[in-house]
Image (cartoon, coloured by chain):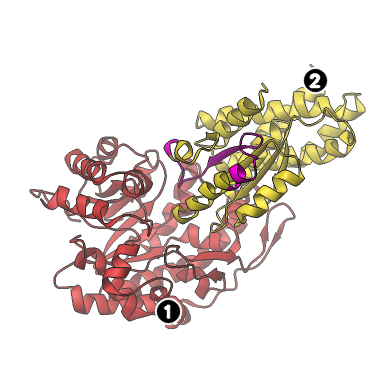
Chain colours: A red, B yellow
Amino acid sequence: MRKEPLDRPPVAVFTQSATIGQMDAVGCAWPEAHSDAKMMAKLGAAQATVFGFEAVRSSFCLTAEAERLGCNVDPGKKDRTPMLKKHPFNFDPMSDVYDEPNLMDPEEFLKGGRPAVIIEATRLMADEYGKEYPVIAGNTGPFTLAGHMVSTENLVFGIMMNPEEVHKWIAAVNPIVKAYSQALSDAGADIIQMSEPSSSTDLLSPDMFTEYSGNYVKDSLACVKDAYSVLHICGDTSAILPLMADTGVTGCSIEEKVDSAEAVKINNGRVALVGNIGVVHPLLQGTPEDCAAAAKRIAAAGFNIVSPGCGLSALIADENLRAVVKAIKG
Amino acid sequence: MSEKLDALIDIVVTGKMKLAKDATQACLDDGIDAKTIIFEGLSKAMAIVGDKYAAKQYFLPQVLLSANTLYQGLNLCLPLLQGDGSASKGTVVIAVVEGDVHDIGKNIVKAMLTGLGLNVVDLGKDVPIKDIIASAQENNASIIAESTLMTPTLAGMKQCEADLKENGLKGKIKTMIGGGATSKEFAEQIGADGWSYDAVEASHLAASILGIQ
């Protein structure tokens, strides 16, 4: 994370790390591990204990905060992450009807639900694995969380119709995001890895990024004390990578939709680059050889940390993950 | 080409949603029939929007705005087409497959296919494969379009191909897939009739499957 010259980059899963293979190996599985701190700690450490990746990570999804704030969540299955079923607030740019963002205060937020479980799991991981591995804690970015509360499509459409109402919602969730990021650091996380998929260029135009996401991330993630900060955004981030760095985060985690060498060139040494092995190709559908080749190519391109470019699919084969570790560690 | 129709095209492309109804009405008042408004006006406008998206001049927010502007005009025109057999160039049943709720991409594909002049039956998100196939049969659809962003649901897409085959519908109803978890290779592997990277490609793909320009 300090961008120091090393003989090889570390290899770690910075995004969702659990797979069926790890669940079977450590005897903790989804969906139970989403809401049980001990199981989460054990399964979150499995990337290191089972495969030899060089980090442990708490939380496996981006629904914990939304659920705490009133979203209806389907807990998923062993091979499927939880998903949001219903947005609790009305935000309709077509009919010009907008609910007020009446949310619980940040202190209350941290005390219960799955965020409290994740904080506890992070604490357990720091105690048990912290001396040996960096502890990563994953959470949800402000624009993404606001979208979870009111429907992402409506929020994006709102930018064109009524930007003030959009800002009102992001500003309302951001103190919660900030308090949660700090609480994860206080629990012992070395790195806060915030996923902000809804501000990817698949959803926002690059010229909207700073106003609707970056400025808020600057406040809620980049200012976190006693931890490094990594901003993860999916899709083709080539146009927004400099803007992601402008938020002041320590690192940026990106997908394979940006060519690795091109990303290193755009970044020009500003932040630690984390990524960008494709999750579907090669990890899910490729061979171990494909996975090893991708990892080596990314290391050679100059990424600071070799990692999957997005949350792992639980169905990824053990041998593909082992091949990534072996390609980097030897 | 009528000036009024040009004005409507411009309104859809630039997403001036509040002006769309009046502009469509002005076309009708001018004696332009609903079919011409759809195919020479609204479709053309969405094609321009698609080009701008492909060129990265437009992103999702602008496309959403144009799509909603398009629907304002369509809502006026569609009822006037009732009973006109030549009105639709084909029917597409579209859905996000069971196990996934990410539907923004699907909604944009729907807008582009509607813009193409197709009748689009939208089943929404998290839809069981059997419901998709039943709806396709019921609506006499030429195409099933499925999307997913989540890898566990890829199995559902494979299942769809198997079920179509089992029911003797494979080939009669064409399938096209898309979404972040899919790929061209995956589409070929399961025997889908086509894959597209984004909504613009999807409209080109549907046009080529149906043999329309």
**Magenta region, residue range:** B163-185
Amino acid identity at mark 1: Leu
Looking at the image, residue A24 sits to the left or right of residue B97; the answer is: left
Quadrant of residue B161 within the rendered picture: top right
Amino acid identity at mark 2: Glu
Tell me the subunit letter for badge 2: B
In the rendered structure, find residue A110 and report the number of the disc placed on it: 1
Residue B89, how many percent across, how many down? 75, 29
Can residue B171 be seen here? yes
- Which type of secondary structure does the marked residue at label 1 adopt? helix
- Which type of secondary structure does the marked residue at label 2 adopt? helix
Residue A145, how many percent across, how many down? 50, 62
As drawn, which residue projects farthest toward the top? Answer: B1
Looking at the image, which is closer to me, A267 or A52?
Answer: A52
In the rendered structure, find residue A247 and report the number of the disc placed on it: none
Q: What residue did someone put label 2 on?
A: B3
Residue shown at 35%/65% (left/top)?
Answer: A138
Q: Is residue A18 magenta?
A: no
Looking at the image, which is closer to me, B162 or A296?
Answer: B162
Residue shown at 69%/35% (left/top)?
Answer: B142
| Circle 1 Cα neighbour tier, 10 Å, few/some/many (<14 / 14–19 / ≥20) | many
Q: Is residue B154 above or below residue A61?
A: above
Residue shown at 39%/51% (left/top)?
Answer: A233
Q: Is residue B181 magenta?
A: yes
Q: Is residue B198 above or below residue B156?
A: above
| Circle 2 Cα neighbour tier, 10 Å, few/some/many (<14 / 14–19 / ≥20) | few
Looking at the image, which is closer to me, A85 or A113?
Answer: A85
Number of numbered discs present?
A: 2
Residue A52, how many percent across, how many down? 17, 61
Tell me the subunit letter for badge 1: A
Looking at the image, residue A273 sits to the left or right of residue A172; the answer is: left
